[in-house]
Each structure stands twice: as C-alpha cells, then as structure tokens.
Amino acid sequence: MSGPLLEAEGVTKRFGGLVANDAVTITVAPGEVRGLIGPNGAGKTTFVNMLTGFETLDAGSIRLGGAALTGLPANQIAARGLVRTFQVARVFSNMSVRENLLIPFLAAGSPGGVREGQAKAADLLATGTLEHLAEEPASVLSGGQRMLLQACAGFMIPAVRLYVLDEPFAGINPVVKDALIALIEHENKSNGRAFLIVSHEMAIVRRLCPRVTVMIQGRVAAEGTLDEVARRPEVVQAYLGSAAA
Amino acid sequence: MTPETGWLPHASRHLGAAKGWTVIFSAELLVQTVLSGLMVGVLYALMALGITFIYSIVKTINWAMGEFYMIGSYIQFVAVHYLLGARWWWLAAIISAAGTFLVGLILEPILIKPMYARPMQRRDDYATVVTIALLLLLRSLAVALGGPNQYRPESDLPVVWIGPLPQEGARVAAFVCALLALAVFWIVIKKTWVGLALRAAAQNRVAVQTSGVDVYRLDAIAFAIGVALAGLAGALLAPLFMVFPTNGAVTTVKGFEIIVIGGLGSIPGALVGGLLLGLAESLGAAFISSPYQNVYGFLLVIVVLIVRPDGLFGERGREA
Amino acid sequence: MSTGRTLEVSGLRAGYVPGVDILSSVTLAAAENAVTLVIGPNGAGKSTLLRAIFGILEPSAGRVLFRGKDVTGANSSTLKAAGVSYVTQEINSFPLLTVEENLLMGAWVFRRDRHRLRRQLESVYAMFPILKEKRHDRAGSLSGGQGRMLSVARELMTQPSLLLIDEPTVGLAPNLVAEVYSLLSAAKTATGAAILLVEQNVEEALPLADYLYLLNLGQVKAEGPGRDFDNSRVRALVQECLLG
Amino acid sequence: MQRRKLLGAASLLAVLATLGLAPVIAQQEPMVFGLITPLSPPGETALGQLAKRGAEIGVEYINEKGGVLGRKVALSIHDSAGKNEQGVAAYRRLVSSEKAVAVFGFIHSGVNIAVNEVAKEMGVPTMGTQTGASDVTAKKYDIAFRTHAVDAPRAATWLGWIQKNKWKRVTVIAETTDYGIGLAKETEKQSKEKNLGLEIQTIMFDRTTTDLLPQLLQVKAFKPDAIVNVGVGQPLDLMITQAHTAGLLPGAQMVTSYDAPARPQFWQLHGDKGVGISFVAFYSPKSELSDLGKEFAKRYQAKFNEPPVYAALNGFANAIVFADAIKKANSTEPKAMIKALEEGSFTGWSTTPVTFPRAEGALWHNWSPPLMVLHYTAKDQTPATAEVAYVLAQ
Amino acid sequence: MSAGLTGGVGAFVEWRRVAAVLAMAAPPLLALPLFVSEFTAHVLAISAYYVILAASWNMLAGFTGQFSLAQHGFAALGAYTSGLLVYHLQTPLWVSIPGGVLTTALGGLLLGLLVLKMRTIYLSIATWAFAETLRITLSAAYEFTRGDLGLSVPSLYGHVRPVVYYYTFLAVAALCLLFIHVMLKSPIGYFMRAVRDDPMRAQSLAVDITRVKLFAFVASSAMAGLGGALYAHYVLTLTPSIVDFSEMARIIVMVVIGGLGSFIAPIIGAPPVYALNTWLAAWGEWSMVAFAAIVIGLMRAYPAGLAGLISAVWGRRRSGKSFL
C-alpha cells in the first residue's frame, strides 16, 4: 500500500477561549506503531476524541486511507477501521465478557456471520488470558482486566486499520501490561494493524513505538524516536515547566 | 358584539374548534396576565429549586415533591385556622416550612438512605419506585384522613392595586415571601458551613465523606431543605389555590417543567425557568386557548429541549 | 497494645454485593512515621481495604484498631475526627469550590474551632505556597499536579496520625509522579504520621516503602521490610498471584 | 434480615391466597349492595366520599328497619379511582364473586358507561349517583338507572333564573370534563332553541388549572351580567376568589352549577366574599325534604357534624330505592327488579317521587331532583335561610 | 449498514429451550380459566394486558436504558386511535387496531427522535411531558375525542366475556414476549443492552446507537399501542384517565418489583401487582395507602426485585444471564 494511512491536518478545537488543539497535523503510515506523548493537559485526549468522532472539529480534516472521515458519526468511523479505547476502561458491565467481544463484531457487520465472530472471540480470549472469565459479567473484572477486555473488543472489528489506545497501561499491574503488549505486537506483526498509543509509560513506549509524536499545549512540538525527542529542549522544558507551575 | 375596549382597541376572533366562543385581546389584559404569571412563576421556581437541590446532593428525583407541597398547605391551614389566625400567616408559613423540613428529615433515612447505606445494584430504580410509592402513599393518606372537604387558611390581606390592575394580597405576599426564601436559601448555601458541605457534596460525594462529614446526615438535611421549599410554596399558595389532597400534583408538574427549561442543578435556571413558564401559561391561556393552558408549558419544555438539550442554564457535563 | 503501631487490621472481610467478598481475611499493620506500601494485582482488594478501614464500606468480619482503639465499622466522620485521613484514587477535590473552600472542607471536623482553623490553614499554606497564591481560584482550574497537592493538603488540615493514600500517581506524566512522591516524603517528615500507601506503580514507589504488603484475592500474600523487596522479586510474586 | 424477607414473602402469599379465596366468602346470608365510587386520586375523591357516607347511612337505615326480604343488607365498597377498567373490575367482582344485587355510587361518567357495557351482559342493575354524560342512560340499556339532574334541566335552571332577571350578557366558564363540557354545550343549545336573545361568552379551562385570572380577565372585558361557574371542587372556589380579585365580584351575579356553597366549608373558604353568590340547589325551605330525607339529614348531621349535600343525599337514596324495588319485586332477580324500578314510584330524599320512566335520550331511566337557584344575601347563611331566587318548574 | 440491525435475527436463540418453556407453560395457562370465577378471569385478562405494557416498557427502560415515562401514553394512543377510527369512520376492527399500532409506532419514532440526545432525567421529563400533553389534549379536544364524556368503542367479539379476552391478551402477551426474547438473542438485543450499559462505548465500537434507540422506541411503542388498542375493545369506554400518571407509576412498579432489565420481570411483576391493586380496591380510600406501603416494604426488602430474589434462590448470581 502506498501513501499514509491516517492524515490529520490542521485539526483545531476550542473550548470557550481555550485552544485545546491548535492545528494539529499527524500522519501515520500503514502498519506503523506510533506513540503520542506529552504532559498532562497537552490536548492528547481531545485530539483522540476528534479523530474518532466524539468531538467536532473547529477546523482541519481527517482522512483514513485517503477517504475523508470528518463529520462522520463515531460509529461509522469505527466501522471504517479507526477504533479507540478510553482512558478509564469502558466495558458493558452487565454483559458477559464474551458478549462484550461479540458486540463490535456484530455491529461492524461481517459476511462471515456469527460463527466467525465466536471463533474470533475465542481466539482473543485465549491471547488475552481472559478465557476463564468468558461467561462472567464484565462487572466482576478488575481494573486491569477491564482495560484488557476494552482493548480486545476493538480487535473484534474486522476492518480495524488504525487502533488508537488512550492510556492503556495506566493503573494496571505488570503482568497484565505484558499481556496487552503481547497482544499489540501480535496484531501489528501478523495482521499489519497500525496503532496510535497515548501513554506516559516511557519504557513501554520506547519498546513499542519506533516513532513518537509529542504534543505540548495543544500543538505538535516534536516528532521522531523517543530518544531523539526526549533530547529536544522544548520537550524537556514542557515536562519541567508543568512540574514547576 | 361590543365588549369593553381596554387601553387598546380590542380584537376578537373565533376559534375553529369552538364556534362562537370568544377570545378578547387587550393591552390591559396583557399586562395583568404577565404580572400574575410572573408572581406565580416565582412560587413554582421554589418547587423547582427544591427538586434540583435534592437531585444535586442525593442524586434522586423526588417524585413525591408535590406531596410535601400538600403537607405544607395542610400545616398552614391548621396553623392559621386553629392556632394563630389570619394575621399571623407569615409565622404559620415558617412553621409549615419547618414542619415539612422535619417530615423530610424523618422520611429520608427510612426511604432514601438504604440506597447508599446498603449494597445495591440499581439505585436509580429503587429511588424512583420508592418516591413514586411515597407520592401515592401521602396523597391517599391525605384523602383518607382529610375527608371530602377542601380548606383554605383565612387571609385578610387586601387586594393590591398595581396601577389599574388588581392583585390578590395573598398572591403579592406569597411572591415577596418566595423571593425572601430564595435569598435566605442563597445565604445558607453560600455563607454557612452546612452550605459549603452541601455544595461540596453536589460535586463529589466521596470526598465529602473523606473530609469527615457524615454524608448520610447531610443527605437527610439536603432532602429536608428541598422538601421544606416545597412545603413553603404550599403554605404560601394555600390561600390562593386551596388545601386538598391532590393540590401538589400540578405544582410538581410545573417544578419539573422549570427544571428542564432552566437546567437541572442551576439556581438561576430555576428562577428564570419559573418566570418563563408562568408567562407562557398565562399568555397562552389568555390569547390562544384556555383549556390547553397546561400544554403551553410542555410545548415550551419541548422547544427548549430541542434547542438546548440541557436547559437554558444547564452545564453539559463532559462525558468522556 | 504496642508502641508505634498506629493501625492494626486483623481478619478483615468486606464486599459490595451481598455474598461476594472482595476482602476475605486481611491482617496488617502500619507504623507511625513510616510508609507502609500495599501492592498487588488489580482486583486484589487494595482500594476496598482502604474503604473498609475508613468506614465507607462496612466490614462483615474482622477488626480495625486505630491507636489501640477498636474502630471497626465506625463511620468516616468519627475516624476523621480521631485523626485518620483518606486520599482517594480519583481526583478528589471539589472542582467548583475555591482552593480555600476545599481546604476548609478538610477542616470540617473542627470547623467551630476558629483558632485552630486559622493555624492549620497557615501551616498548610506554608507547606504549599502555590496553593496560597491560588486560594481564590476554582480547584478545577488547577493543573494535575496541583490538584493532587490540594487533595493531600486538604487531608493534612486535620494533622492526621494515619494517612490512607490510594494510587496517587495513576495517569500522571512521569515528572508529576516524582513530584507526588516527594510530596509524600515531605508530608511524612512534617507530620510523623503513619502512611498506608496503595500503589500500582510498584517500581517507583518501592524506594519509598518502609514496609510492604502484597495483597492477592483479598488476602496478604507476602510481607516484609521494604528493603527486602526489589523489582524482580515483586514481579515474580505478582506473576505467581496471577497464575494462581 | 432473613426473617424479615420471609415475613415479607409470607404476607405477599397471604394476600394472593385471600384473593383466590374471595369467591368462597360470598355466602347466602346478607344481601350485598355494591358501591363503586372514586376514593383515591385521580378520581374525584371528595364526591366519592360523600356518596359513600350517604350509602353507608342508607344501608344502616335499611337494616334497622328489618332489612330486605328478611335479609340484612351489606354494603361492599370498591374504589374506582375514576378509572374505567378499575370500575369494571369492581363490578365483575361484586357480581360474580360477591353476588351483589345492585350497584351504585358512580361519580365519573366514563366509569358508569364502561360498567354499563358489562352490566348489560351480567344483568345486575346500576344506578348513576352523580354522573352527567347522557350516554350513561341514553343508550337505553335495561340495567342503567340514574338519579342525577342531567345537563338539560340544570342548564334550564340557570337560564330561567337569568331570564327572570332580564339579564342579557352571560358568561359560562366551564372545566373540560364530562360535566363542564356537557353543561356548556347544553346552555348554548337551549339559549338558541328558546331564542332567549342572550349574548353568551363561553370559556373552557383544564381542571388542573390553578390560576384562573387570565380567563377571568377576559370575562371582565366582556362585562357580563351573570356568570355561570361550572367548576367542580377546587376550580369552583378558585373562581369565586379570583373573580373578586379581578373586580368582577361583587358586581356581576355568579351562580355555581351545583350546591357546593351549601357545604359548611363554604363560609370557611370564602368569608365575606361568599355573600352574593347564587347556586343551583336541590331542596330549600320552600321545597321540603321528604320525611326520609329529614331522617337522613338528622343522622348525617349527628355523624359528621354538618348538613348533608347532594352527593350524599343521592348515595343514601340510591340504597333506599334499590331496597324498595327489591321489596316491590319480592325478588333480587334483575329482570323483576328492573320492572319494579320502571313501574314503581319511590320515596327518596326529596318530596318529588322517584320514578324511572323509559323516556327519551338522557332522561331514560333518569330521575331528576327538583332544581332551584338559592342566593346568599348575608354571611353564614345556610341553604335553609338563603333566599330562593328561582325554582325550575317540574 | 442495516446488517447491523437486522442481520443474524435470532442468531443466539436456543429454540429447543423456548419450545420446552412454551410447552410447559401453555397447559396450565390455557386451563386456568376453567377453574376460576368470571371475575378472576377478568383479573387474569387485564393482568395479561399489563404484562404486554410492562414488557414493552421493560424493553425500552430495562434493556435500552431509556427511562421513558410515556408508555401509558402510547397505550392510550393505540386505544384512542382504534376507538376514534371506529367512532368517526366506522372502520372495521381489523383496520382500526392495526391503525392504532401504526400510529403508535409513528408516534414512538417521533418521540424517540425528539429525546435521542437527552440525558436520562431530561428524557424522563420530556416523555412525561408528552404523555401529559396527550392527556390534556384528549380532554380538551372533546369535540373530537369526547373527552371525559367517554368514547364508546365496540367490543372485539360482540360480547365481553372475560375468558375469551384472557386468551386473546394471553396470546398477544406470549407473542410479544417471544418477540422480545428473539430480539434479545439477536444482534439488536446485544446492541440494546450495550447502549444501556454505556452508549458512548457502544458507539466507539461501531454500534449505530441512534438506530438502536429508535428501534427500541418504535418497537416498544407499537407493542404498547397494540395492547392499548385491544384493551379499548374490551373496556369499551375510553376516557383520558388512562393517561393518568398513576398508570405509568403502576407499570414502573410492576417492572421494578419484577426486576428491571430482567426478561421475566413483566411476567412475575405485572400479575401480582395488578391483582393486589384490584384486591385492595375494596379497602376504599385506604386501598392506595396500603398498596403504596406494600410497594415501599417490598422495595426495601428486595431492592433488586423479585427476579433478584428468584435468582438468588436459584443460586444464579450472574446478572449477565437472563432467564429463559
């Protein structure tokens, strides 16, 4: 495939007088795993919200594989292959873990039908070490397991091309972290899916993401490998700055 | 046909549905209508404030609000008719508010507290059903105990003339008292420790608890303050709208409409919503068609919801 | 019973839904002027433990002793007045109140003692000058780090002898994590309180710990002085827990 | 906790068991009269309670006089809450499970009409105690009876009063219920038919309206000579109060469509403002109560410490008339009872004999009490001391 | 796109289990009228009617999380549409009843669109405002609806013997429940429950929540409309009192006592509540006092409703599983 997968150009959002995103431009290539880092309040989540249709754009455009996504409702964006998770894990608490996985599959529609979905869900449950909980309601899951389930659900959409994970590693224990990392690496290598990972966990970002984008105060401040950008004075300043404030 | 001409030439027209039944317009009528709408609107705002206030702390819509209005009106009648006499109506109103406050203070721990104090999965449903049942209970209890008669606390307040326009003394008094009550409420909320705790609890229940506030007692107080506002409205409106078992039903309706118009959780919203509703209803009844008087409020509600789904003053909680 | 042990918990059992216990039987203690770290996989019952100690959740069995006195099932306001403070995991300030109003809420239990109120306010402002600067701003306008600072500062208003802290660094950028930990060290030295710290962020919290408990499935799985544990040992233990 | 749950479950079971057993209870001994009347909201509970009071005294009286056909009479009271289906369920229960032989107490026309549809099949006659819609009897069902001043004579009463005083401009202000609608229409119709040359302003309002000033201001602009107040309960009183505020009263004449001002609460509610009010009433010093009516009034006064009003009088008379019809028919067999009711002449509370002719329209099986307009000329008057302003010729 | 809504209908239905349950339930339910009085048969018939209403509301509030307060309004709309068609146009019942269903489906669509973006409380109030408006309009437009004078409606079968109507309502209730069951065990049912639990998450996972919410509104309104239209031809006289809030309160009490969001809630909630209501009517003015007190007592003892109690007894604590 030639050309970029995601082209976000000049994406801008204002809340009252505050500019949360100021002409953010990010391009992600097919099959790439990109990190998105920045101090708290840099506007990362706002950007993710606009990317996935949960917030309207004040200016700019978003294209996936060349097709415009701007203005589409969130569910259609997801069905077209741009899927996300939420910072605080969101699952359907009163439905079983298995049902949680089937929903995106059924919603996105697939010619293979229900049987294929069930097979796929079984696969994911095995990879995510959630098998023994498959028939339990999601409400019994721990925080880490919810995060894992949330991430797995996204993979159930057959057309996923770019998966945006918003702080997937926050507040979960090392072992679940490892399971999630394995899952991401697996889906990236064998299915060629691209990822955009928002995280503060620099060790994991370094391991997963060849390139990272740094956002500071609603703007893209730098892009490159983590070690490259970490040396840029304005990035260091931003992290220190917010610490000193 | 030569009806009286007001300040402006009158116009009259026939309604299609009601052939030959007349509606008369005049500027005098307009002003009078606006005035009486505004005055009653403030009383409705009191109800709305109570509902909003309870919701913001206890996170429960109290469907039995009108029944506390009813209780307030009965206390007012008993106090004025049997104990104090018409001259002391204002003292009776304070007693009514205090009485309703007490009833709320007693009922909250029995009915609402289990929602938080016990492990429970469907809190909202529990609260909805319990308050609806409370509504049926109190209303039917009033029928059973109150007998078939309706009552009215005596009022010796003279008619007040605003220009050429008459206003019932009791209505003006109720209006003034309602404004006073709103001011007192505002002071309590902004300037006292309990008010601080209440404002805090509306934002973060757990943090209030970790601050060492007995949050169950706070719930009971919030509930009691909310219903006391309804009780006060009932007491103040008793000489105008009478005392009978179902007199709270209509005011509850108005209270809910105002909340939607003004925005849940907003104090200025309650006031402005009350005034707007009062206006819409009296103007609609006077100039469009009277049997549909109570429909105008609903239409206003629907229009507001379409234009601003969170009411005029509602803050849209960022849901992400 | 013993000196220096501010908190003693024995055989504590609790849960949210009848019949489902999150804590099955927890026994632990926290000493004064020390950080006691509680770690464990998600779902081990760490947050539940704090809630049960602080009386937000009523335990169904077991005992909680605070300075030797039985406070099992006592309500939060009693505990708060006695000198226990609880910093919850969620951002736990009141966003629409001013910074000072937030701090006043922290002083609720002695709200009628004006002198003490003023004194405490002064001392907290001295500890965190930035809060004094912003005392008339809404708490919601503070940055993430300042928000945490406000949470801790509010709980320090009562000069607690036991501070329960639930995952203070979750979701924070790395620079803020360090800041929060230095804040906690400062609080410890300033007040000499016993700090019971629940953390997920094991690697960074470990150096801070004087004593450590590892919780799994509502029970204490391992314990010992902080220096006995390093990252690899903790990792191995957690792994063990998850595999059953 | 566990015990409480068991107790709760047990009481629920007990409730259900009793429901299943209800049919067994109906035994031979007492003869059952059924009362279906609104006793809880949204029904018109005030009228329901009055009808119930009357019926209770009626049954008491019958039993004191030795019962009917050698059997005691038991009154079985059922709350209709003003809901049609609930009334129907009550009728079915009364007839099929409790073996009631007569059913009355209806206040809401809808309930009465719905019940009549079932009664037509099940056979036990019904009597509308205070239901105004013409369909209650106009469908000409054999089982449908009624003792109520229906729209036509009622409207004729105030139109007669207006004509007598030579007033020309008249406002009818009525609630949008069966009662209000029927009377407003009837007033316009009769005025037209009789060519009275009146100019009529009709204003309708929803009965949950708590503020009638806007409507009354329109009335004021119309400058009527007379106002017909067709509200029931709270709206009626509200209209009197607010008409004073609006400056309509005193000045114009106001007549209320039923005898609410006869109730002792009237003076408590209105004080001086009650002076000058006229109202449609059913008996007065001029038109005496029957001996039976006097007896009832005495008992009612003793029991409730106030004089009886219309709904209570009718509730009482319904019980008496049914009892007499059964005696006359010497049977509780519905056909025989209906025949007795149609052919007989009964003594009710008024001096006018009670009859149920197979007449036209709403007057089918309908007895109308004597109608008149009473006028309060001074404070604290009672119907006995009020001025008789007009009497409708029977 | 429509594959999301209609694809795989009944995909997860275990038909053998459904057939078994039907086979077990049918004989006693069919034989029941043989052993009871006419009054009890009436109570059973109306109970079945309330099962329909409760099930339709449960579908909207319990499964989709739209706490609407207009269900009694839709029942009334169905009843009045059918009644008015007969009254004004003399249409036969087989036209007027489907007419009622169609009207309510359309009404459900419009109201559903109106409240689509509203938060829970606002949705409740807006739907309730709709019902109140309907009630007042039915009263005030008496020239057309006959208002409180009572709209007379012909009966379904030319008579009103309760047993026949019991079978009618029973059959319709069974069909409605079957429909709901099949729907719950289809993708659309999964979407509905997902929307209830977390609409935002559902949307982020490609669920078209607008369509799901509207579907639930239309289907549940049509169901209530069908119930109402049939009810009209059994009660024979319609007045605006059927849109009184106490009717909605009754439906809510039935479902919540049964256990909101549980499939069997309407079945185990509606009949006892209606029977209790009717039985208590003989207590006169104390009837509603007793009723309300019993409801409060029950709620305090079993906040999760009877379904919660039953599932606790059966030892099945998983709320993720529904009965049947």
Image (spheres, coloured by chain):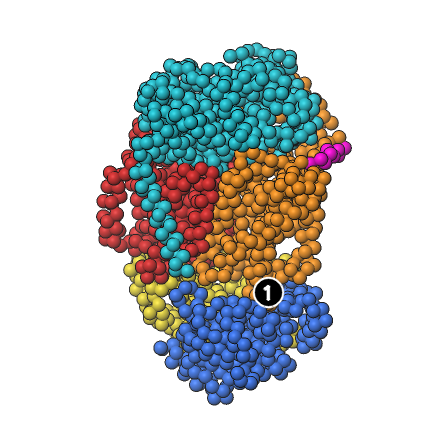
Residue B6 showing in the rendered view:
yes
Instruction: Classify residue E49 as left or right of residue B160.
Output: left
The chain under label 1 reads: B
Decide if residue C47 is on the left or right side of residue B4: left
In the rendered image, which quarter is residue D344 located in? top left
Residue D129 drawn at (x, y percent): 46, 25
Q: Residue at x 29, y 60 (%)?
A: A115
Q: Which residues are magenta?
A: B155-163
Considering the whole magenta stretch, tell me its main secondary structure. loop
Residue at 48% across, 41% down: E245
Toward the viewer: A202 or C36? C36
Secondary structure type for disc 1: loop
Q: Residue at x 46, y 34 (%)?
A: D38
- From the viewer's perspective, is residue A76 above or below residue B286? below
- State the hue of chain A: yellow
Q: Nearer the viewer, residue A179 or A133?
A: A133
Chain C visual colour: blue
Image x and y of residue D360, in percent: 42, 14
The letter of the cyan chain is: D
Image location of residue A233, percent across then percent down: 62, 78
Q: Mark yes or no: residue A185 visible.
A: no
Determine the image quadrant of residue C26: bottom left
Residue D95 image position (x, y, % from top left): 34, 31
Q: Which amino acid lies under the numbered mark 1 shown in the image of this protein? A: Val
Q: Mark 1 — residue? A: B213
Q: Which chain is red?
A: E
Q: In the rendered image of this protein, does residue B254 appear above or below residue A203? A: above
Q: Is residue C144 on the magenta stretch? A: no
Q: What's the colour of chain B in the image?
A: orange
- Please tell me how crowded label 1 is: few (under 14), some (14-19), or many (20+) other residues with Cα within 10 Å: many
In this figure, what is the number of numbered marks? Answer: 1
Q: Residue at x 54, y 49 (%)?
A: B62
